[in-house]
């Protein structure tokens, strides 16, 4: 039930993000979701793409450091309190959220949250037991 994201380490300077997206565009890789975190010297770009293998190869061939990470994607009610409900379930199970980011589907009443947990398997079990939809990787890459 886990999905895979790629993380790219970038120097924090003008044009690096454009370079990454250009490489992916040339490789015909579609970005489904992203998050960017930075410090003064470097950034970490986390991506959900439609083809991890092609993205990883294209980026590495162009000198980027790329890492794959397991994440968990869940459907969240797109309404006030939707995320709170999920975070309360995780808090009560003592599962830590290391980071998260979201994207909205083009239609429907659900958003998608991508989580990195300290205990992914336990998080999936707890979420599923609480009737929270966990999205498998193959479906996530197609959204």
Image (cartoon, rainbow, N blue to C red):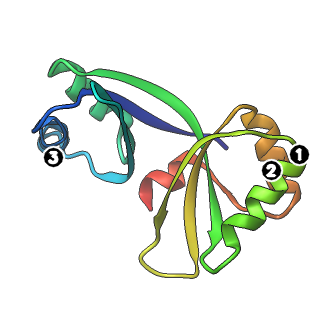
Q: Which residue is mark 2?
A: 90
Q: Is residue 90 left or right of residue 41?
A: right
x and y percentages locating residue 42 in the rendered image? 29, 26
Q: Which residue is mark 1?
A: 93
Q: Residues within 10 Å of mark 3 (few under 14, many from 20)?
A: few
Q: Which residue is mark 3?
A: 25
Quadrant in the rendering for residue 122: top right
Location of residue 77 with respect to 6 vertically, above or below: below
Mark nearest the camera among 3 and 1 is: 1
Q: Which is nearer the eye, 82 or 48?
A: 82
Mark nearest the camera among 2 and 3 is: 2
Location of residue 84 with respect to 42 vertically, above or below: below
Q: Residue at x 32, y 31 (%)?
A: 43
Q: Are marks 2 and 1 in contact (CB under 8 Å)?
A: yes
How far, Cα to Cα, is label 2 from label 3?
37 Å
* Mark 2 / mark 3, whichever is N-terminal: 3
Quadrant in the rendering for residue 24: top left
Mark 1 secondary-structure assignment: loop
Q: Residue at x 15, y 35 (%)?
A: 16
x and y percentages locating residue 123 in the rendered image? 78, 43
Mark 3 secondary-structure assignment: helix
Q: Residue at x 60, y 46 (%)?
A: 115
x and y percentages locating residue 136 in the rendered image? 61, 49
Q: Which is nearer the eye, 107 or 111?
A: 111
* Mark 3 / mark 1, whichever is N-terminal: 3
Mark 2 secondary-structure assignment: helix
How far, Cα to Cα, is label 2 from label 1?
5 Å
x and y percentages locating residue 11 in the rendered image? 22, 26
Q: Are marks 2 and 3 in contact (CB under 8 Å)?
A: no
């Amino acid at each position: 039930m886990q999905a895979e994201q790629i993380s790219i380490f970038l120097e924090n300077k003008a044009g690096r993000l454009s370079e990454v997206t250009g490489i992916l565009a040339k490789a015909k890789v579609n970005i489904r979701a992203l998050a960017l975190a930075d410090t003064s010297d470097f950034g970490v770009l986390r991506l959900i793409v439609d083809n991890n293998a092609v993205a990883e190869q294209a980026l590495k061939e162009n000198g980027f450091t790329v890492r794959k990470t397991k994440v968990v994607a869940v459907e969240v009610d797109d309404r006030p309190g939707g995320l709170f409900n999920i975070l309360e379930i995780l808090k009560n199970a003592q599962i830590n959220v290391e980071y998260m980011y979201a994207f909205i589907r083009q239609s429907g009443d659900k958003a998608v949250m991508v989580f990195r947990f300290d205990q992914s398997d336990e998080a999936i079990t707890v979420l599923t037991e609480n009737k929270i939809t966990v999205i498998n990787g193959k479906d996530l890459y197609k959204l």
